[in-house]
Image: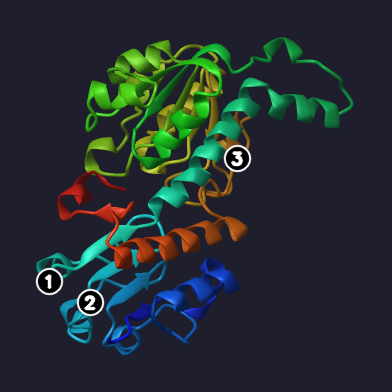
């Protein structure tokens, strides 16, 4: 019996972030592992050399599209597991035309995004950002009257993809109403998560916290515009851990300058925002440098998912992160 060959295509720097010694042993228990031994974005020639004769391949950040020329070097290739978020940087029609399955580790990335969104939700409701600054400046307790608990409130979730659903799952530990806007999910699907499907305008008007988890696709560009920001409650909190393009940032600045809303932005358009951008100085705007997903040790969670997904494939079990070509239009 010929041993399976597994090609690890990302460069050495990304490999070290993804895989620890335990992961490597697990990979080697599945098949003969061939690692890309270069540093820096892999060239097409490096990808060709590494993938040659492979049955399975792992891609990640920095990998270029798997073109016909690259795939011709691996005629037995059965599947590609992308140890990152969106598969769009690596997939090509050629993959699916050859019957090669594609899986994303986005579910693992989504866990970190959801946890970050929950942290921002709680910290903002508790008014921790302002109270911390007041305390640094010598005060004590001014602003306590603005503290709110994650209790008896309504949280609006825009986008019920993987990150949105993980966020909903976390919110179910609290006594809150959860509204969800997602045109690609049915009311029954949303109900099974423990939330209620709502129209966008209804959600914005009713929610104390609005958390964005929608993909960056043409239909979501500036989905949250001036008109929709005006629908939000005074003192509502807007959290964006998805993509900056979803928000009309000029309109958001206008509302923040009026003091109507509070915003937590892990993403902006562009990134980073200009050094003199109002987001950096407005007291009711918290900006973090795109850290909601996987950073440092959290990246190992993607490596673990990739290893487990390869194991599922070899055993003939369903792939948890499988991506079909028709899904690309609604994915980040």
Q: Quadrant of residue 324?
A: bottom left
Disc 1 to disc 2, C-alpha distance = 9 Å
Helix, strand or loop status at disc 3: helix
The disc, 1 or 3, on the residue closer to the chain's N-terminal end is 1
Q: Which residue is mark 3?
A: 280
Outermost residue toward the front? Answer: 1
Helix, strand or loop status at disc 1: loop
User: Is residue 248 at all visible to an observer of this figure?
Assistant: yes
Q: Residue 130, how many percent across, how many down?
A: 72, 25
Instruction: Reply above or below: 49 against 308.
Output: below
User: Is residue 231 at all visible to an observer of this figure?
Assistant: no
Q: Residue at x 63, y 16 (%)?
A: 149
Disc 1 to disc 3, C-alpha distance = 48 Å
Q: Residue at x 47, y 33 (%)?
A: 167
Q: Is residue 56 left or right of residue 241?
A: left
Instruction: Reply above or below: 277 against 207.
Output: below
Q: Which residue is mark 2?
A: 77
The disc, 1 or 2, on the residue closer to the chain's N-terminal end is 2
């Amino acid at each position: 019996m010929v041993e399976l060959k597994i090609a690890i295509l990302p460069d050495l720097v990304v490999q070290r972030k993804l895989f620890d010694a335990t992961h490597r042993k697990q990979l080697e228990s599945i098949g003969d592992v061939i690692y890309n031994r270069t540093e820096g974005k892999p060239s097409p020639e490096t990808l060709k050399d590494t993938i040659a004769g492979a049955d399975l391949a792992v891609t990640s950040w920095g990998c270029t599209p798997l073109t016909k020329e690259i795939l011709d070097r691996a005629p037995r290739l059965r599947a590609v597991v992308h140890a990152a978020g969106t598969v769009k940087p690596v997939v090509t029609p050629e993959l699916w035309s050859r019957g090669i399955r594609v899986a994303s580790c986005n579910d693992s990335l989504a866990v970190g995004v959801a946890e970050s969104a929950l942290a921002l939700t709680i910290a903002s409701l508790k008014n921790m950002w302002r109270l911390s600054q007041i305390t640094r400046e010598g005060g004590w307790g001014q602003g306590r009257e603005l503290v709110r608990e994650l209790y008896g409130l309504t949280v609006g979730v825009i986008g019920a993809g993987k990150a949105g659903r993980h966020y909903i799952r976390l919110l179910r530990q609290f006594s809150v109403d959860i509204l969800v806007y997602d045109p690609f999910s049915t009311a029954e699907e949303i109900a099974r998560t423990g939330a209620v499907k709502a129209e966008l305008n209804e959600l914005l008007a009713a929610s104390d916290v609005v958390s964005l988890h929608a993909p960056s696709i043409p239909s979501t560009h500036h989905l949250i515009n001036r008109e929709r920001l005006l629908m939000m409650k005074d003192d509502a909190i807007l959290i964006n851990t998805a993509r900056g393009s979803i928000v009309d940032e000029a309109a958001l600045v206008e509302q923040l300058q009026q003091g109507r809303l509070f915003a937590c932005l892990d993403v902006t358009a562009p990134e980073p925002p200009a050094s003199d951008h109002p987001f950096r100085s407005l007291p009711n705007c918290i900006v973090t440098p795109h850290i909601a997903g996987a950073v440092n040790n959290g990246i190992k969670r993607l490596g673990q998912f990739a290893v487990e997904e390869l194991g599922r494939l070899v055993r003939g079990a369903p792939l948890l992160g499988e991506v079909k070509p028709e899904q690309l239009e609604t994915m980040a």
